[in-house]
Image (tube, helix red, strand yellow):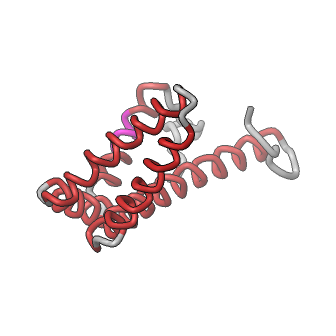
Amino acid sequence: MDRSYTEAGAPVLWNREDIVAKTRELAGLISSSEEVRVFQQAERQIQGHERIQTLIITIKKKQKEVVAFEAMKNTKMAAMIEAELRELQEELDAIPIVGDYQEGQTEINDLLQMVISAIHSTVSEKIAVERGADSPPSSCG
């Protein structure tokens, strides 16, 4: 984004509210991206898929059982249920729409990480230039 200037030629300073407003604008752009559209479509299909929903519920139940058996120091039962969990997870992962959903999550996360990196790099560069430093600091914190 190009820097704005006042009539006198001084750079315009942005306040917190301005930055939050621009952030919301960026969030709106991301929300209407192709990545989000594909993810939401896969999410709707998963929510309407009876077998997937049954598998998810069963997996969550089995995970709680494993935690309970581990807390009771019953490693034999915990191991048996973990084996069942692996089978259920493999069945879930074999359903194509689940892969699409997971891929969509990854693509959205990658997009968000790209935005965060771009903001970080730009801010670091601006701070280094205004400070007169040769290179940006290794971290901002």
What x and y, as percent, mark residue 66?
Answer: 46, 39
Which residue is pictured at 32% across the width and 63% down the height? 92
> How many numbered discs, if any?
0
Q: Tell me where the magenta segment starts and ends, as one range.
A: 21-25
Q: Residue furthest right?
A: 134
User: Does 38 sit above or below residue 3?
Assistant: below
6 shown above or below 32:
above
Relative to residue 105, is residue 5 depicted above or below? above
Seen in the image, is 4 located left or right of residue 135? Answer: left
Residue 75's x, y, as percent? Answer: 56, 39
In this rendering, would 54 be left or right of 103?
Answer: left
Main SS class of the magenta portion in the image: helix
The residue depicted at 73 percent of the width and 37 percent of the height is 140
Residue 19: give x, y in percent of width and height: 46, 34
In the rendering, at what x and y percent does residue 141 appear? Answer: 74, 32
Residue 123 location, quadrant: top right
Q: Quadrant of residue 118?
A: bottom right
Residue at horizontal 35%, vertical 39%? 24
Relative depth, front residue between 120 and 8: 120
Left or right, 38 with reference to 82: left
Question: From the viewer's perspective, is 130 left or right of 10?
Answer: right
